[in-house]
Image (cartoon, helix red, strand yellow):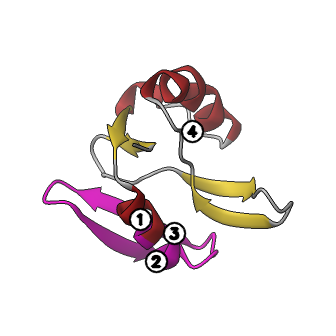
């Protein structure tokens, strides 16, 4: 199951610019394949993104369908943010 980083208070899920396996740049959810990898890497990624509140983030597990839907909602647009609410739904926020 994939893992993502979520801000504990705002419920924002970490999204950033990335390179896919075809060497195309895109903006999407930052996904890790296992919890250990996520725990080891998310703090440095947050710092690279200019966020210094790393203690306010947590690693959560989502399924592949939820990840795909989240990336569709982001629509490769860095002006959009996503929140993952406890009932298990995405909320889109445009900046």
Q: Nearer the viewer, mark 3 or mark 4?
A: 3
Q: Which residue is mark 3?
A: 71
Q: Residues within 10 Å of mark 2 (few under 14, many from 20)?
A: some
> Which picture quadrant has residue 4?
top left
Q: Residues within 10 Å of mark 4 (few under 14, many from 20)?
A: few
Q: Residue at x 83, y 62 (%)?
A: 22
Tell which circle, 1 or 4, labels the residue nearer the N-terminal end.
4
- Mark 2 and mark 4 in contact? Answer it, CB < 8 Å: no
Q: CA distance from mark 2 to mark 4?
A: 23 Å
Q: Measured from the top left, where is residue 29 in percent x and y?
A: 54, 57
Q: CA distance from mark 2 to mark 1?
A: 8 Å
Q: Nearer the viewer, residue 13 or 79?
A: 13
Horizontal side, residue 69 vs residue 15: left or right: left
Q: Residue at x 50, y 50 (%)?
A: 14
Tell which circle, 3 or 4, labels the residue nearer the N-terminal end.
4
Q: Measured from the top left, where is residue 86 in percent x and y?
A: 16, 53
Tell which circle, 2 or 4, labels the residue nearer the N-terminal end.
4
Q: Which residue is mark 4?
A: 51
User: What stretch of residues is rendered in magenta?
Assistant: 69-94
Tell which circle, 3 or 1, labels the residue nearer the N-terminal end.
3
Q: Which residue is mark 2?
A: 73
Q: Nearer the viewer, residue 70 or 22?
A: 22
Horizontal side, residue 61 vs residue 45: left or right: left
Q: Which residue is mark 1?
A: 82
Q: Nearer the viewer, mark 2 or mark 4?
A: 2
Q: Is residue 48 above or below residue 78?
A: above
């Amino acid at each position: 199951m994939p893992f993502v980083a979520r801000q504990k208070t705002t419920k924002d899920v970490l999204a950033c610019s990335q390179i896919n396996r075809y060497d195309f740049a895109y903006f999407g959810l930052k996904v890790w394949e296992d919890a250990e990898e996520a725990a080891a890497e998310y703090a440095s990624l947050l710092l690279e993104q200019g966020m210094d509140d790393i203690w306010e983030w947590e690693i959560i597990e989502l399924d592949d369908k939820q990840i795909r839907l989240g990336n569709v909602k982001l629509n490769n647009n860095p002006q959009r943010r996503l929140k993952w609410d406890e009932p298990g739904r995405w909320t889109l926020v445009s900046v």
